[in-house]
Image (cartoon, rainbow, N blue to C red):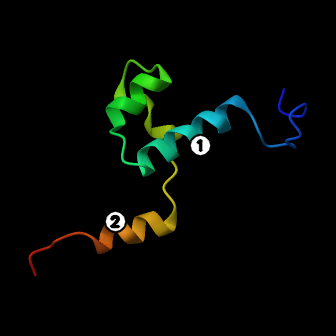
Amino acid sequence: MYRAAGLGAGYSSHSGRRTFAARSVANGHPLETVQILLGHSNLDHVAPYLDVSKRDTIEAVAKLDLGI
């Protein structure tokens, strides 16, 4: 299916779900919503689909108010 769409090796249903989950969270959707959309009964099952980029991590840390 992926090759028919012109996508090379490395693309799969799993990679599509991972991209969907990561982009949903990056766009501000709660993990609980992503859990429901992926069809998982347990929130812990969503974690493997989440890829947080180094840039996103740095930005999140920069936004922390540490009260210093």
Q: Which mark is residue 19?
A: 1
C-alpha gap between disc 1 and disc 2:
19 Å
Q: Position of residue 58 (x, y in %)?
A: 40, 71
Left or right of residue 51, residue 29 in this image: left
Residue 59: tell me if it is visible: yes
Specify the quadrant of the image occupied by residue 4: top right
Instruction: Of the two numbered discs 1 and 2 on the same chain, state the one appearing first in sequence.
Output: 1
Q: Quadrant of the C terminus?
A: bottom left
Secondary structure of residue under mark 1:
helix
Q: Secondary structure at mark 2?
A: helix
Horizontal placement of 32 versus 50: left or right? left
Given contact means CB atoms under 8 Å apart, are the residues at marks 1 and 2 in contact? no
At which x and y percent is residue 37? 45, 25
Which amino acid, by three-letter code, is at mark 1? Thr
In the picture, residue 35 is in which quadrant? top left
Mark 2 lies on residue: 60
Q: Going 52% across and 61% down the picture, which residue do you hit?
A: 53
Q: Quadrant of the N terminus?
A: top right
Image: 20 above or below 53:
above
> Which residue is painted at 89% across and 34% down in the image?
3
Q: Which of the numbered marks, if any, corresponds to residue 45?
A: none
Tell me if mark 1 has few (under 14), some (14-19) or many (20+) residues whose alpha carbon lies within 10 angstroms of its own. Answer: some
